């Protein structure tokens, strides 16, 4: 499986990192080796002094497709989840300044947390889902999918013009404002519509 991530999809997060508002979705991929195994702690890698959490709503692709029309995109997923796009921000900043790819900053081992999946039929409107991330039991990020610059069906249409989607692929849809640094012994937990879908201990 591959993990397809969208960057800069929430205006408030674009502002906090002083990025330009994109005219097309920003897309990058994490390798399957970046998936943090279930129940495993997250170890801050030695090459970074500034690893950030980014909570994001996830969609699991259920069948093969390419050049998918936005109007058919909803037939490509049945499950919705929540996860973290861990980012070595110091490394990413250096790479961005040099115009180099971000993979080392975003695709390292353990950099993708994928929580429990829920059937999309649990929700009335996928473009009105509230979610949040707590650090040590205090809310540090909260968002709503209604605030995404590109909605999930538009994202699936867009990315499938470049990458064939396969069963089991996961789409990370971008993070709202409030990203921040993790430290050893932090405890992160993420909830979608007030249901906790993951928790992870930082080491
Ligand atoms: Zn992200």
Image: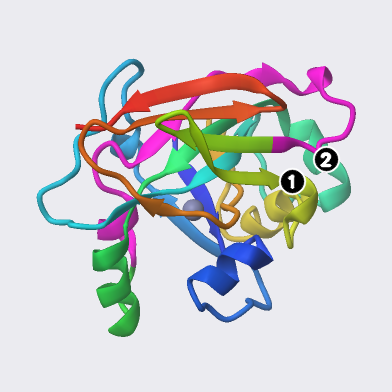
Which residue is at a point 31% across and 22% down the rendered structure image?
37
Q: Which mark is residue 145?
A: 1
- Give SS at disc 1: helix
Mark 1 or mark 2, earlier in chain = 2
| Camera-side residue of 196 and 32 | 196
Across and down, in percent, residue 63 comes to 65, 30
Among the 4 quarters of the image, the one containing residue 50: bottom left
Q: Residues within 10 Å of mark 1 (few under 14, many from 20)?
A: many
**Which of the image's four quarters has the C terminus?**
top left
How far across and how far down the image is residue 36, in percent?
A: 32, 29
Judge whether 28 appears above or below 145 on screen: below
Task: Depth check: give the residue in front, 134 or 92.
Answer: 134
Is 11 drawn above or below residue 4 in the view shown? Answer: below
Side of 12 where 185 appears, left or right = left
Give me the residue at 85% from left, 42% from top. 72
Q: Which residues are magenta?
A: 102-130
**In the image, is 109 to the left or to the right of 132?**
left
Q: Mark 2 = which residue?
A: 128
Side (left or right) of 82 relative to 30: right
Q: 122 and 158: which one is in front? A: 122
Look at the picture and state if 121 lies above or below 138: above
Residue 122: within the magenta?
A: yes
């Amino acid at each position: 499986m591959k993990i397809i991530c969208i960057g800069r999809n929430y205006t408030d997060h674009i502002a906090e990192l002083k990025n330009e508002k994109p005219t097309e979705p920003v897309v990058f991929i994490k390798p399957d080796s970046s998936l943090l195994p279930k129940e495993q702690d997250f170890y801050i890698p030695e090459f970074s002094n500034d690893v950030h959490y980014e909570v994001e709503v996830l969609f699991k692709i259920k069948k093969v497709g390419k050049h998918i029309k936005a109007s058919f995109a909803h037939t490509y997923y049945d499950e919705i989840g929540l996860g973290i796009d861990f980012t070595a921000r110091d490394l990413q900043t250096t790479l961005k300044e040099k115009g180099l790819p971000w993979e080392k900053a975003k695709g390292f081992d353990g950099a993708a947390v994928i929580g429990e999946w829920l059937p999309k039929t649990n929700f009335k409107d996928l473009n009105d889902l509230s979610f949040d991330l707590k650090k040590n039991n205090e809310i540090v990020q909260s968002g709503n999918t209604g605030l995404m610059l590109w909605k999930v069906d538009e994202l699936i249409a867009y990315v499938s013009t470049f990458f064939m989607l396969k069963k089991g692929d996961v789409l990370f849809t971008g993070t709202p404002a409030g990203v921040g640094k993790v430290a050893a012994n932090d405890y992160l937990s993420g909830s979608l519509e007030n249901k906790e879908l993951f928790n992870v201990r930082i080491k």
